[in-house]
Image (cartoon, rainbow, N blue to C red):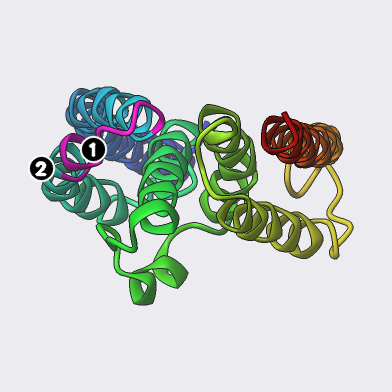
Amino acid sequence: MSRGAVRKRGELTSHIVRSIRRAQRSLRSAELQKRKAMDLGDKILRSCRVAVSNVHSAKLSSAKATLRRSSRDFRRFLALVGSNHLQHWGYAVQVTQEFVEASLLLAICTGEEILPLKELDSLPEMAILYGTSDLIGELRRNVLASLATEDLDELARTFGVMSELYGELSSASLSDSVAPGLRRKLDTNRSILESTLSDLTDEISRRNLTRSMDQLASRLQRNK
């Protein structure tokens, strides 16, 4: 091998070694950032699940307090994953979608915007689609929990929100290669809407029957 070829091979090898070391440094840094993000994300996920449970248990003040505290962690989380191009990392999407879901559930039930709506569009697209899709199921849980006591007009308004969200989500036929699992979620949502409508119809019939029976009993009592 000529001296020129030997020198060229040495330069090539040195360059490859530098590239390997640079790649290793970058990936070590990304690994460290992911560990930090996961520690913070796990904390956010726990808070979101507690807040959702509190909403369904009508502990709205506790839900608000929990999500307000979690919102600070959520902003730190977004800064952490956003600065390292991890927005579309599966775990980052999961954390974001659950915070979106919990925050929107609270906003619909109480009018309290823990996540300002103007910030929604800045979040990853998949988190918005998955979070609002899962929100439909949480709204059904809320309807069922309130079915026996809540004003029917209010329940009908909640059902209207569910229907509008489903209609918008299903209006664009996105493939699984673009939005994995979304079609399956929408199939589930369709079943949720059908079941909720049936439950509301049954409750309306039950209340009408109860009212008619009460009126009949009252007339019979007067005619004694």
Any mark on residue 105, and which? none
Task: Determine which residue is flagged by label 2.
Answer: 69
Q: Where is residue 63 in the image (x, y as percent from the top left)?
A: 23, 38
Q: Give the range drawn in magenta.
A: 56-64
Q: Which residue is drawn at 35% across and 35% down?
A: 55
Front in this rendered view, residue 120 or 33: 120
- Depth check, mark 2 against mark 1: the one in front is 1
Q: Residues within 10 Å of mark 2 (few under 14, many from 20)?
A: few
Q: Which residue is drawn at 50% across and 35% down?
A: 149
Task: Determine which residue is flagged by label 1.
Answer: 63
Report which quarter residue 133 is drawn in.
top right
* Amino acid, disc 1: Ala
Quadrant of the frame with the C terminus: top right
Left or right of residue 162: residue 13: left
Which of the two discs, 2 and 1, labels the residue nearer the N terminus?
A: 1
The residues tagged by marks 2 and 1 sit, at their Cα atoms, a distance apart of: 10 Å
Residue 170 higher or lower than 97, as above or below:
below
Q: Is mark 1 on a helix, strand or loop?
A: helix
Q: Where is residue 216 in the image (x, y as percent from the top left)?
A: 78, 36
